[in-house]
Image (tube, helix red, strand yellow):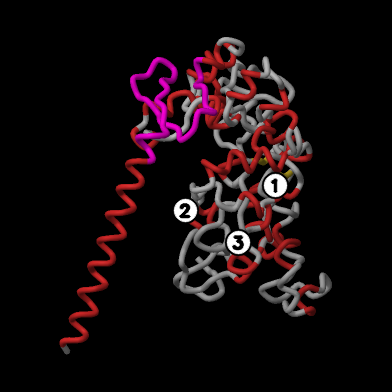
Amino acid sequence: MASTTFIKLVLVLVTFSVIAIWGAFGTVSQATSTSEVALYGSETLYQVGQDDYVGAETCKACHEPQYDQVAKTIHGKLGELTGWKGKVVGCEACHGPGREHVEAGGDRTKIKIFKEMDTKAVSESCLTCHAGRENHNNFRRGDHFRNNVGCTDCHSAHGTTFGPEKAGSITFANPATSERPTLASRAMLIAAEPQLCMSCHTETKAQFSKPFRHKVLEGTMNCSDCHNPHGGFESKQSRLALGSDQSCVGCHTQMKGPFAFEHAPLTTEGCSACHTPHGSNNPKMLKRSSVRQLCLECHTNVFNVELDPDIPTGPHSQTSIRTQNCTVCHSQIHGSNSNKAFFR
């Protein structure tokens, strides 16, 4: 018993000794090798561990337009945030130390220039700060990263300069932009959603122009409301967090459930088994013009004799307009809490 107590006491003393030594060396190192640099007129100072950092004011001497533009963004105001005290902020936070670049008279090989870097290298630079957020954690496994679409293909680290979008061939069909000014300028995008997405995903433009569609071109919703452009585990990088088609039932809450009697396609294939999510020529964005055609693709076990147009009997007779539409009787096709046949 005494030996056990002695061992515990020794471990406690060793732990406190290590903490004390680490703190002392950290203080000495910081005091002897750091320099303070002010950024963007802020009183907040940051400290660096070497003399290679010259500060954003030095960059301003040659790059004043870029300096003024960045100063208006969140990137330019990091020095004012409590969480960034003691860290490198400003131009050199992204472009690296600038001393050699300045001393060499602006030698482009002595600084990190994103336009001359590989797309994946650019994304890795951004992820040094942005990787900790849930929205970006899966970027490296996403389709964009695998297809060499990097952060700066969609975002501008210096901030955007474009004004409100006007109506046009692939721009908003109503004054949604003026009503929602952050629709175009949020996340420092180089263009507004969904025009930015459509510049690559051109097939969606025609889909969103069909008679029955999600109101994306009208500006009431964005591509990123359903898709995560920074990657994910689901097909098409859909925002599915809590089960099949969570991004759909986020708006269509009446279809969410859970139901006592589930419709199998909803729990297996999801909403896209029957609907086309971007747009369709059919009401309710269905894949088929007739509801019965859609139902009979799966429900092939309906009695063949009842499907024979020469035999006008039975509840599934196709000779009667009333019984041709399956949802006349099976109205709760998304799920029911009262009937396994999805009757009303």
Q: Which mark is residue 32?
A: none
Q: Local crowd at mark 2 within 10 Å, few (<14), some, or many (≥20)?
A: few
Q: Residue 75, image x and y in percent?
A: 49, 27
Could you tell whether 313 is left or right of 29 in the image? right
Could you tell whether 324 is left or right of 126 in the image? right
Examine the rendered structure and indicate whether residue 27 appears above or below residue 110. Answer: below
The amino acid type, in three-letter code, at marker 1 is Phe
Viewer-side residue, 106 vs 287: 106
If the image is split into quadrants, where does the N terminus sit?
bottom left
Could you tell whether 76 is left or right of 96 in the image? left
The residue wearing badge 1 is 145
The residue wearing badge 3 is 328
Residue contact between numbered discs 2 and 1, judged by CB atoms under 8 Å: no
Q: Which mark is residue 253?
A: 2
Q: Residue 266, image x and y in percent?
A: 60, 65
Query: In the image, what residue occupies the spot 43% across and 24% down?
Result: 77
Q: Local crowd at mark 3 within 10 Å, few (<14), some, or many (≥20)?
A: few
Q: Quadrant of residue 326?
A: bottom right
- Residue furthest toward the bottom? 1
Q: Residue 122, image x and y in percent?
A: 67, 37
Mark 2 vs mark 1: in front? 1
Query: In the image, what residue occupies the spot 72% across and 45% down?
Result: 280
Cα gap from disc 3 to disc 2, whole angstroms: 22 Å
Q: Which residues are magenta?
A: 29-57
- Mark 3 / mark 1, whichever is N-terminal: 1
Q: Local crowd at mark 1 within 10 Å, few (<14), some, or many (≥20)?
A: some
- Residue furthest toward the left? 2
The amino acid type, in three-letter code, at marker 3 is Val
Task: Specify whether residue 314 is in view.
Answer: yes
